[in-house]
Amino acid sequence: MKQKQSGFPPPRIPAYPAERTLPAAPIALDPKRHLVSVRGKTIRLTSREFALLEPLVEARGTVVSREHLLERGWGSEQVTEIESRTVNVHIHRLRRKLRAAGVEIITVKSVGYRLDIAFEWIKFGT
C-alpha cells in the first residue's frame, strides 16, 4: 500500500557533522539520537537536561551564562516568563547524574556555569 503524502515538508533536523570532537571532559554527545555517554557509560537525561548540557559541552570549558542556558533550555520566547533560578534546579539534577560518571559542572558565581575540564576529549555524534 502506498503511503499518503501530507503535503508538508519533512521536519528540519539540525545539521551536525557525523563526528565533531572538542577538547574538554570525557563526554560523547550525540544530538541526532539525543544520547549522552561518559567514558562509554550511557547517561539518561531528560530533554531539558540534554538542552542544558549541550551548550556547556559546546563552550569547551568556558563559562555559559544562566541567561544563555535559559534560552537554550526553554526557548527565547519563554525566557522572560521563567525565573533564572529554574536553571539552578535543572543544573543540580544534571550534576547528580554527571558526577556519578566523574564529570563536574562548576558554578561561577554571578556569571554562569562551566564544565570542569579533564584532559580528555568530548565527541559529538557517532
Image (cartoon, helix red, strand yellow):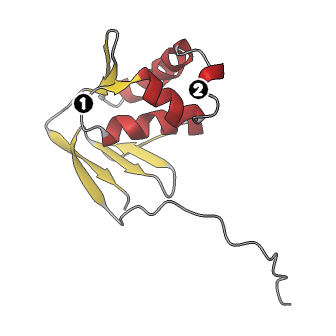
What secondary structure is found at the residue carrying circle 2? helix
**In this orientation, which residue lies closer to the viewer: 6 or 45?**
6
Figure quadrant of residue 74: top right
**Residue ID for mark 2:** 79
Instruction: Pinpoint residue 6: horizontal percent, then vertical percent.
Output: 82, 75
Residue 87 seen: yes
Q: Residues within 10 Å of mark 2 (few under 14, many from 20)?
A: some
**Residue ID for mark 1:** 62
Residue 104 seen: no
Instruction: Pinpoint residue 40: horizontal percent, then vertical percent.
Output: 33, 47
Instruction: Pinpoint residue 60: horizontal percent, then vertical percent.
Output: 25, 38
| Quadrant showing the N terminus | bottom right
Could you tell me which residue is drawn at 56 percent across and 17 percent down?
A: 86
Comparing labels 1 and 2, the label whose residue is closer to the camera: 2
Figure quadrant of residue 57: top left
Could you tell me which residue is drawn at 61 percent across and 22 percent down?
A: 80
| Quadrant showing the C terminus | bottom left
Q: Earlier in the sequence, mark 1 or mark 2?
A: 1
